[in-house]
């Protein structure tokens, strides 16, 4: 394929992915907006004043970046896992794999579709958060970089889940039993400085902690971890998941059965 043909194929996959989640926006965009609004009401307005300041900020200001990242993570992951598994279930992925389109174009197209939904929901949640608190972005480059790279990472994770899934039930196992515990234990609602030594060490083994804290640093200027180390970890995870995803596209028998 020529460079122009590859570009057309890439854009076509992205446009299809964006149209897919926009067509069913009551299922893809509205629920996360409502859920995060409830988080703001419950944790920010009702519980926050009882907890008091955290890291020098009102509690609702402190949790706002984490809630935004929560929406980005879950929607980036959910878009790719549901879309690619749907393509497997409908057998359309087989036609895509035997086409002249390179595997990296296929993978990147699905990932960018997940990024589009993740960032779209992130923008919606950010706008909703302004009704409850103010967000003065301290480091715009860090903020944008972290949210984009995190969306890419979890889009790749959703792709891997979709490859291994054998039923629609399988695409909910990882979000329910792995992703949800990691996000809630990733420092969204608290600072790890509050934890005793053992649990602080356990929390530092959670990769989502680094993403949320790096984003919080970009927005508020405070973080429990070193931001440079956070970027390094995110980059390593992206490289590893991308390489494994490419391997699965070439070698997974489940995609061609």
Image (spheres, grey):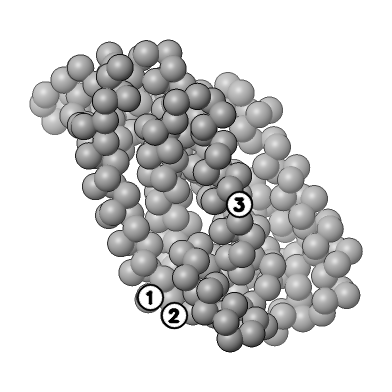
As drawn, the label of residue 226 is: 2
The residue wearing badge 3 is 180
Label pair 3/2, CB-CB below 8 angstroms: no
Spatial CA distance of label 1 from label 2 is 5 Å
Q: Residue at x 33, y 33 (%)?
A: 109
Mark identifier at residue 5: none
Q: Is residue 139 among what the camera can see?
A: no
Q: Quadrant of the N terminus?
A: top left
* Mark found first going from the N terminus, 1 or 3: 3
* Disc number placed over residue 229 in the picture, else none: 1
Do tag 1 and tag 2 residues touch (Cβ < 8 Å)?
A: yes
Measured Cα–Cα span from mark 3 to mark 2 = 24 Å
Position above or below: 211 against 80: below
Q: Secondary structure at mark 3?
A: helix
Relative to 230, does residue 239 appear above or below in the rendering?
above
Number of numbered tags placed on the structure image:
3
Q: Secondary structure at mark 1?
A: helix
| Residue 219 as seen in the image, left or right of residue 146 | right
The quarter in which the C terminus is drawn is: top left
Residue 120, above or below 221: above
- Give the x, y percent position of residue 162: 42, 33
């Amino acid at each position: 394929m020529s460079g122009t043909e590859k570009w057309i194929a890439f854009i076509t996959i992205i446009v299809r992915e964006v149209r897919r989640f926009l067509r069913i926006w009551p299922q893809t965009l509205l629920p996360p907006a409502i859920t995060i609004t409830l988080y703001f009401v419950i944790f920010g307005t009702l519980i926050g004043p009882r907890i008091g300041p955290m890291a020098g900020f009102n509690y609702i200001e402190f949790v706002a970046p984490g809630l935004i990242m929560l929406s980005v993570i879950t929607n980036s992951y959910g878009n790719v896992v549901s879309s690619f598994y749907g393509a497997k279930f409908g057998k359309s992925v087989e036609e895509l794999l035997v086409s002249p389109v390179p595997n990296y174009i296929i993978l990147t197209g699905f990932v960018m579709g997940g990024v589009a939904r993740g960032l779209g929901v992130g923008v919606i949640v950010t706008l909703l958060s302004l009704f409850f608190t103010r967000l003065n972005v301290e480091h715009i480059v860090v903020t944008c970089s972290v949210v984009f790279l995190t969306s890419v990472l979890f889009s790749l994770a959703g792709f891997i889940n979709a490859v291994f899934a054998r039923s629609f039930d399988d695409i909910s196992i990882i979000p329910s039993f792995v992703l949800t515990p990691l996000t809630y234990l990733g420092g969204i609602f608290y600072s790890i400085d509050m934890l005793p030594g053992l649990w602080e060490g356990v929390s530092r083994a959670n990769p989502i902690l680094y993403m949320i804290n790096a984003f919080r640093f970009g927005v508020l200027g405070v973080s429990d971890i070193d931001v440079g180390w956070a970027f390094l970890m995110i980059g390593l995870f992206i490289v590893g998941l991308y390489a494994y995803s490419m391997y699965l596209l070439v070698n997974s028998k489940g995609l061609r059965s």
